[in-house]
């Protein structure tokens, strides 16, 4: 090519940028629907799921106030039960603890849910005491524990195994994958008359870090937290912004408090009523993983990717010390990643401009919703109005668009 770019052989029907759990699931369902089409999945890393998918706590829950989120997560979980051990599915439950104030604020949403259908039970303080040796007393910033919900159809899985599961299914159907390929630029055609708005502007190709170009009829951007930085320069307001999130693995020296009975087979993830602090137990490794979802003060930027021990000391440790005063632990590992948020409803986005579709805005729950999102994104690029989800339900694809958005605000947020 005259400008020094190297055209890679072939012309693809679809190119998907981003082989995280979302791009891999999308690639898988698109190839399944269109086995004859030529589809290329690209990622800058060496394997599928190595971006924020790998940083995730990989907890899953079907427990949301929003009907849309219940559908996306519930149907995805019904699919994850199928590969089961392959994705290291561990349905140990969620124990969600509420202060009186939080309970009153969420009461309407909770009472609209069917405990039998959604497989949860409401617990009073005594029942919580049977499971956890928790300190109930309010002090300073830490509210009293008033009630809880035990969600049975929740737990954890391996997020990287899930992404690789979709990527390998995609490959086994004849899909093509290019790892170590970092897309730097979009080639946009139709601007010959210099920004005339009646030009048919579309994406002709993409260019990687080595100057190789890749051409396709349709492009799908599934780059998670990197979406804003990739699409803003070409004039697309994706509605997706990154925010740093950190996790800390604590080696448990004594289990006092975390489980009332250390022989218990109940090992739920725990959501504490203060500061958005949550705990993922990995008792067979004698560790717990703790995180926190703070808002004000945490920038919508891909700034410093390093975890900050001070953050643990200031935001998380005081909460643990309050609710589990006898718990003895050593901070053994820490890492940071990014949520890709869509505000204000914290529900995923699937939208298109010309021949480019972007899928993201998973807002901290992309692992648990990936199967449904992949199916809906694949349906959208095929021009279908509805997607068939794993549990047999039908989902109108435009509900996740920006232009015809039809989703509810989520009340049960970590
Ligand atoms: C600390 C933390 C805890 C979390 N806990 C949970 C949880 O418990 N449960 C849950 O459901 N979710 C959780 N999440 C959220 C979850 O990880 C995300 O929702 C999910 O991984 C999003 O998947 P994705 O495929 O969109 O993004 P990613 O996995 O980040 O994939 C995007 C891919 O795009 C690639 N890419 C980006 N730009 C380019 C480019 N220019 N060229 C080529 N490739 C590119 C990246 O390399 C990356 O592999 C957590 C996230 C974090 C950070």
Image (tube, grey):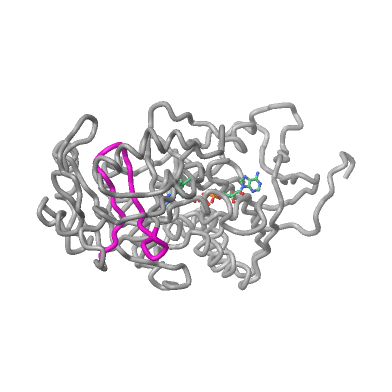
Which of the image's four quarters has the N terminus?
Answer: top right
Residue at 21% of width from left, 57% of height from top?
Answer: 150
Q: Is residue 21 left or right of residue 200?
A: left
- Which residue is at a point 25% across and 44% down the rendered structure image? 325
Q: Which residue is located at x 40 percent, y 51 percent? A: 289
Considering the image in quadrants, where does the C terminus appear?
Answer: top left
- Relative placement, left or right, of 313 versus 273 is right
Between 287 and 10, the one lying in front of the other is 287
> Which is more toward the observer, 318 or 142?
318
Taking the image as shown, residue 316 lies to the left or right of residue 49, namely left
Image point 35% across, 43% down: which residue? 406
Residue 113 in percent (x, y) is at: 19, 54
State yes or no: residue 264 in magenta: no
Give 146 or 190, whichever is nearer the viewer. 146
Q: Is residue 270 magenta?
A: yes
Where residue 123 sits in the image (x, y, percent)? Answer: 13, 54
Q: Position of residue 258 (x, y in %)?
A: 27, 54
Q: Say above or below: 189 vs 157.
A: above
Part of the protein shown in magenta: 266-286
79 is higher (above) or lower (below) than 256 = below
């Amino acid at each position: 090519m005259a400008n020094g770019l190297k055209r890679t052989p072939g012309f693809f029907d679809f190119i998907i940028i981003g082989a995280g759990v979302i791009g891999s699931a999308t690639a898988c369902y698109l190839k399944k629907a269109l086995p004859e089409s030529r589809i290329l999945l690209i990622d800058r890393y060496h394997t599928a799921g190595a971006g924020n998918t790998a940083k995730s706590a990989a907890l899953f829950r079907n427990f949301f106030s929003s009907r849309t989120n219940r559908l996306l997560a519930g149907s995805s979980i019904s699919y994850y039960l199928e590969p089961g051990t392959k994705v290291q599915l561990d349905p140990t439950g969620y124990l969600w603890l509420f202060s009186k104030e939080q309970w009153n604020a969420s009461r309407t949403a909770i009472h609209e849910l069917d405990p039998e259908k959604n497989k949860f039970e409401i617990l009073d303080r005594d029942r919580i005491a049977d499971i956890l040796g928790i300190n109930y007393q309010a002090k300073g910033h830490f509210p009293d524990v008033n009630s809880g919900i035990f969600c049975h159809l929740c737990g954890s899985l391996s997020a990287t195994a899930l992404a690789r599961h979709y990527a390998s299914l995609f490959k086994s159907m004849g899909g093509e994958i290019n790892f170590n390929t970092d897309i730097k630029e979009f080639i946009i055609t139709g601007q010959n008359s210099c920004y005339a708005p009646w030009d048919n502007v579309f994406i002709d190709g993409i260019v990687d870090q080595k100057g190789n170009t890749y051409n396709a009829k349709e492009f799908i951007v599934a780059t998670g937290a990197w979406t804003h930085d990739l699409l803003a320069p070409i004039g697309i307001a994706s509605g997706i912004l990154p925010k740093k999130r950190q996790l800390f693995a604590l080696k448990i020296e004594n289990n006092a408090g975390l489980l009332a009975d250390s022989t218990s087979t109940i090992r739920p993830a725990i959501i504490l009523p203060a500061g958005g602090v949550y705990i993922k137990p990995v008792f067979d490794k004698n560790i717990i993983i703790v995180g926190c979802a703070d808002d004000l003060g945490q920038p919508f930027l891909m700034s410093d990717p390093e975890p900050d021990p001070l953050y643990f000391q200031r935001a998380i440790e005081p909460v643990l010390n309050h609710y589990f005063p006898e718990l003895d632990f050593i901070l053994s590992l820490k890492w940071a990643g990014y949520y890709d948020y869509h505000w204000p409803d914290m529900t995923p986005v699937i939208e298109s401009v010309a021949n480019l579709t972007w899928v993201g805005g998973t807002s901290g729950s992309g692992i648990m919703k990936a199967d449904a999102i992949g199916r809906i994104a694949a349906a959208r690029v095929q021009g279908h109005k509805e997607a068939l989800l794993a549990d047999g339900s039908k989902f109108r694809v435009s509900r996740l668009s920006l232009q015809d958005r039809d989703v509810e605000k989520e009340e049960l947020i970590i």
